[in-house]
Amino acid sequence: MSTATLDDPSTERRPEGQWAVETHGLTKRFGDNIAVNDVELLVPRGCAFGYLGPNGAGKTTLIRVLLGLTHADAGTMSLLGHPVPKHRDVALARVGAIVDEPRFHGHLTGRQNLQILAAARERAARDRIGPALERVGILHRADDKVSKYSMGMRQRLGVAACLLGDPQLLILDEPMNGLDPAGMQDMREMILSLVTEGRTVVLSSHLLDEVERTCDAVAIVDRGRVVRQGPISELLAGATFVVQVECTEPDRARLLLDGTSFRPQVDVDPAGLTISLPAGTERAVVAEINRVLVEGGISVYRLQHVQASLEAWFLEVTSRLGGPE
Amino acid sequence: MTTVTGSQAESPSPSMPTPPSDHRGSWIPSGAMIATRCMELRKRRGLMITLILVTIGIPTVFLLIRLLLHAFAPNTYGPAGGYTIYGAMVSGVLYTFGFIVAAVLGATAGSADLTEGMFRHAVVTGRSRLALYLARIPAGLAIIVPLVAIGFTIVCAVCVFAAPTRLQFNGVTVPPNLSSAGLQSWAADHEAEVICNFGLDIGPSTPGFSTLNTVEQNFPCGNGPGPGAKQPPGIQSQPQPTQAQIREAATIIARMNYADYARQFLYPSNSLMIKSGLWLELEAVIGFVVGLGLASLIGQRTVAVVLMIVLEVVLTPILSRAHLPHLSNLQRAVVGLATAHLSPGGLPVIGGGGGGPGGHGGNAALLPESTTVAVCVIVAWLVGWSVLGAWRMMTRDA
């Protein structure tokens, strides 16, 4: 991979570009280990963007590079159209982020911690402390010491810290960690409300269901490299077409289907069959499967096209990538 | 690679424009940054209690006990204050402990954000890392300087207001703070005590030699002639001195002893107290800045504190006095030696510092060092450790 400078003039030319986050050839190494490998990432403004990957895939490292918490070894990047790290101060002025587990000074109250962070931002940030605490739902505990906060409350405080800068871009690393179901629901609604306000939220999470519910688009990272990215609906359209069948004599049913022209991959289980068909298969095939089975004397009790989930697609993509190359 | 189309970004942009310049990239910390950093340190209850106990509590308790003892048993226990106590408290307690507590505070300021996970939050604000570092210096000094000042003020107050009321000079109780004429006048009225106890070294060239000799040889001082008198060879015994000669001799002896008398104080002078206060504050500033830089460099508080204590309590006293051939210039680079050479004259040498009574930073026990070199060493330590700490903070992964 070619090594590029971090301040690409081409990126500087359009500071008001359409991308909230834009990286080209971004690379970060730790010795021989390449944590971020030639990443090309484009996050559109005004959406919730999920950043998915198995453990150790390099999600957090990429976020740390984007925020200037550690330096990149190669590549270019920009936040909100401002090249980083050259104009890091301008870019981060409208960025809020939680990286890893949110930690604060335990001997201070939540409000005092935010006062420290607000002091490092513009003057108006100090006026946003109260509203930010209220928005994340911990205003009533704002004057308690953080050492007495639960993990979920620290997560909320971390989000409140993000909001101090009235951010156009929020980067949240595993924001659902430590939240109970109600808290996750609150967080989800808050993220959606932030997006509704026109902000961009980049959500790194291993909770695929949460990402699917919350995000408009995702990128999947594996071994430090972004392997897929795009709107969820488009990505899932490329997922395997799965049909579940509950029937008698599943072994004979499998033999019948093996002889058809569409040659499905059929897995047999005690309840019936799971039939996997290539992406883009038309729904008429479902009726054809039913016809073949019934004409073969198989009693069909249930036949269902299973909607591809992000989780299934994620596992499909990552397992395929995880195999020997 | 599949990319998201730009049409998805067409939702309304946030109303917030890119912020006007708030000097976020500037290396100069804002007042709010300093104030909140100071608050962060001040709210560390355990640390603050320790600082107060060491800088204020120890001298206060020590002096309070002395006050009580003297109040209940004045014949057994001397006054709580006075010049001697002042020297011991300043050179022995406030100097050493002030440095150590300042170093502890500096090490805490330099490492707390890292160990408690706040450094990352602070960096994400986009604020210059150098500004984040520099904000800690005035914030910490705003805590340690007043604490040392309060402890020192208590010591000064007790040493002045509870000082002995009578001065013992050569075993004679003498009124304090007399002028030369005043001492001579007092001597004329206390001729026996002066002639028999004050130091006297006369020769033929001494003004009033004949009178002094007559009085010295014939004035009854207990079992023999007055102390300190040296009989020049070949001098014959003189007739009994008159009362006028005795008074004149006492006056001359008082005038000859005035220089020594003038160096005896009941309590420290204003000048000495001001110089001592500034010297203690300098030591505290050095302790804080070096502790801050060291802790920022290594990212740990405990190790930094241990190293600072070893420097102050072990290395400095050894290197200040040991004569190591070919390494004397290296020894002079020790900051404790430099501050010892800047100590006000009149303070005793205790531990690593002190110029000695009546000295001016030139105590013979210490490795010689000029004032210029001492100042340069101190500046180099302050600047050097600040640069190291700031550099590490600017380059450290958050």
Image (tube, grey):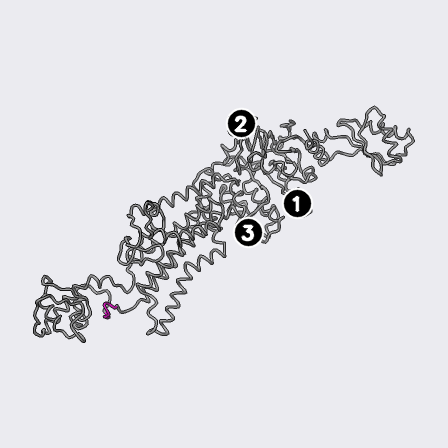
> Where residue A75 appears, x then y in whole percent?
55, 29
Separation of marks 2 and 3 at Cα, in angstroms = 42 Å
2 or 3: mark nearer the eye: 2
Depth order, front residue of B355/A153: B355
- Residue B375 can be seen in this image: no
Q: Are marks 2 and 1 on the same chain?
A: yes
> Considering only order in the chain, which callout, 3 or 2, is on the residue closer to the N terminus?
2
User: Residue at horizontal 47%, vertical 41%?
Assistant: B393
Tell me if residue A68 comes above or below residue B186 in the rendering.
above
**Residue assigned mark 3:** A106
Instruction: Sort mark 3 into few (<14), some (14-19) or many (20+) by Cα contacts within 10 Å.
Output: some
Separation of marks 3 and 1 at Cα, in angstroms = 24 Å
Separation of marks 2 and 1 at Cα, in angstroms = 43 Å
Quadrant where the N terminus of chain B lies? top right
**Which residues lie in the magenta part?**
B168-173
Q: Secondary structure at mark 1?
A: helix
> Where residue A293 appears, x then y in whole percent?
88, 30
Tell me if residue B304 comes above or below residue A198 in the rendering.
below
Q: Secondary structure at mark 3?
A: loop
Q: Secondary structure at mark 2?
A: loop
> Considering only order in the chain, which callout, 1 or 2, is on the residue closer to the N terminus?
2
Depth order, front residue of A230/A228: A228
Q: Amino acid at mark 3?
A: Gly
Instruction: Sort mark 2 into few (<14), some (14-19) or many (20+) by Cα contacts within 10 Å.
Output: few
**Residue assigned mark 2:** A3
Q: Amino acid at mark 2?
A: Thr
Tell me if residue B170 comes above or below residue A93 in the rendering.
below
* Direction from residue B363 to residue B223 in the image, left or right: left
**Residue assigned mark 1:** A186
User: Residue at horizontal 64%, vertical 45%?
Assistant: A177
